[in-house]
Image: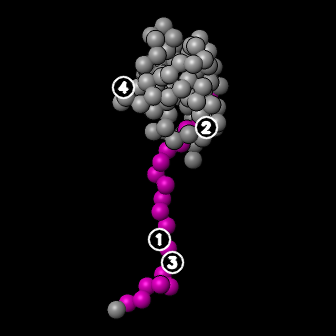
Amino acid sequence: MDDDSDMPEPETKDYEKYIKCTQKFLDLFNGVVGKMPYASILRNSNGDSIKLIDLVKYVEAKKDKILVNEMDKIISFIANIEFKLARPLMELIEDQTRQSELFQIIQ
């Protein structure tokens, strides 16, 4: 039987993509949430819910480096906010040619 205890630990590559939120995203995001009652509970189409203040604090904490799939979840909450509030941000998010105005891919 071979003893492989002296073999190096295999290296794994992190294939997760991270993004950084631009000031434009933060301004639009704050424009959306800033018009909502402090005690709001947001829900997404998966049935998840989050307090508005917790979502805001999360975005503030992660704005410089956030996983793409985490941003997708944040967007899923925004997408279920009242149309007139969410529209300015959601229209840019849904426009593939303009997403770079909101996010920068980082390593």
Q: How far is the residue under mark 1 from the one under mark 2?
A: 29 Å
Query: Could you tell me which secondary element the residue under label 2 belongs to?
Result: helix
Looking at the picture, how far across and down is residue 71, in whole percent? 50, 34
- Determine the residue positioned at 42% across, 19% down: 80
Q: Nearer the viewer, mark 1 or mark 4?
A: 4
Q: CA distance from mark 4 to mark 2?
A: 23 Å
Nearer the viewer's eye, disc 4 or disc 2?
4
Give the residue number, with chain letter if any, for mark 3. Answer: 8
Amino acid type, label 3: Pro
Mark number, residue 47: none
> Do the numbered discs 3 and 1 sit on residues whose CB atoms are within 8 Å?
yes
Q: Which residue is mark 2?
A: 62
Residue at mark 2 to residue at mark 3: CA–CA distance = 33 Å
Q: Nearer the viewer, mark 1 or mark 2?
A: 2
Label whose residue precedes the other's in the sequence (4 or 3): 3
- The magenta stretch spans residue 93: no
Residues under numbered marks 4 and 2 in contact, where contact means CB atoms less than 8 Å apart: no
Per the rendering, the mark at residue 10 is 1
Q: Residues within 10 Å of mark 3 (few under 14, many from 20)?
A: few
Residue tagged 4 = 45
Residue at the (45%, 39%) spot, across then down? 69
Amino acid marked by disc 2: Lys
Secondary structure under tag 4 reads loop
Q: Specify the segment rendered in magenta.
A: 2-22
